[in-house]
Amino acid sequence: MTTPQSTDAIPGARAAILERLSAAAKRSGRDPGAVTLVAVSKKQPDERIEAMLRAGQRVFGENRVQEAQARWAHRRAAHPDLELRLVGPLQTNKAEDAVALFDVIETVDRDKLAGALAKAMARTGRAPRLYVQVNTGEEPQKAGVSPADTPDFVARCRDAHGLQIEGLMCIPPVEEPAAPHFALLAKLAAELELERLSMGMSADYELAARLGATSVRVGSALFGERPAPGG
């Protein structure tokens, strides 16, 4: 698929990806509208963000709290139907800011963070939907709970911290086929009676849709490559 390099290409890229997601879901016997497209807008220039909004996109993913605040705080009033998702690692000292801004936090991965989120939700009165990030490849450099520890961690989130966990999220190892990782995440979710699966990115979103994803996180295939720093 050709990645869009100009704002004029963005509506067509979005329409093509939505069509592919619908077809992939149908091929696996799912509702064609079962998969939410999350536009990963991190570091994208304003003109591409505005073009995506004009194209009708309302669900966006961001990696960092401060960058997201700068990009989206002033757009909330103009677009009250926005849904913002944190898809990058979250530091505990940013928990309250994240709870105040995001509608979904997909990267809950440790008890200290779960506790900080619970306190932030109590203070702010906001309750973003929460996903546990699973490190399906057990990569030491990557955030996330190991698959074996996921059931106990989800139970602690619920019982010790009073959090409602909606789903699971994963980022498979780049050098490995994604399908086994998507299948593992789907199996874990089914065992834990969790209905939401955030998996699949620009290179493998159709595969993820066939294997049960309820949301896919797509950046470059929607927006084009991010401009080089200083470029």
Image (cartoon, rainbow, N blue to C red):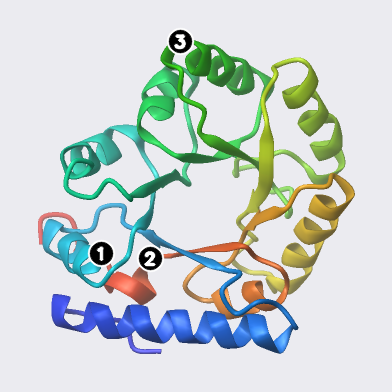
Label 3 and label 2: CA atoms lie apart by 33 Å
Q: Earlier in the sequence, mark 1 or mark 2?
A: 2
Of pointers 3 and 1, the one earlier in the residue sequence: 3
Q: Amino acid at mark 2?
A: Gly
The residue identified by callout 2 is 219
Tell me where residue 132 sits by quadrant: top right
The Cα atoms of the two marked residues, 1 and 2, are separated by 9 Å
Mark 3 sits on what residue?
A: 123
Q: Quadrant of the C terminus?
A: bottom left
Residue under pointer 1:
226
Q: Are marks 3 and 1 in contact (CB under 8 Å)?
A: no
Amino acid type at image mark 1: Arg
Task: Give x and y (percent) for residue 79.
Answer: 23, 50
> Residue 102 location in percent, x, y?
40, 37
Q: Which label's residue is closer to the chain start, 3 or 2?
A: 3
At a point 85% along the width and 44% down the height, the residue shown is: 192
* Image quadrant containing the N terminus: bottom left
Residue at 70 percent across and 19 percent down: it is: 162
Amino acid type, callout 3: Arg
Mark whose residue sits in front, 3 or 1: 3
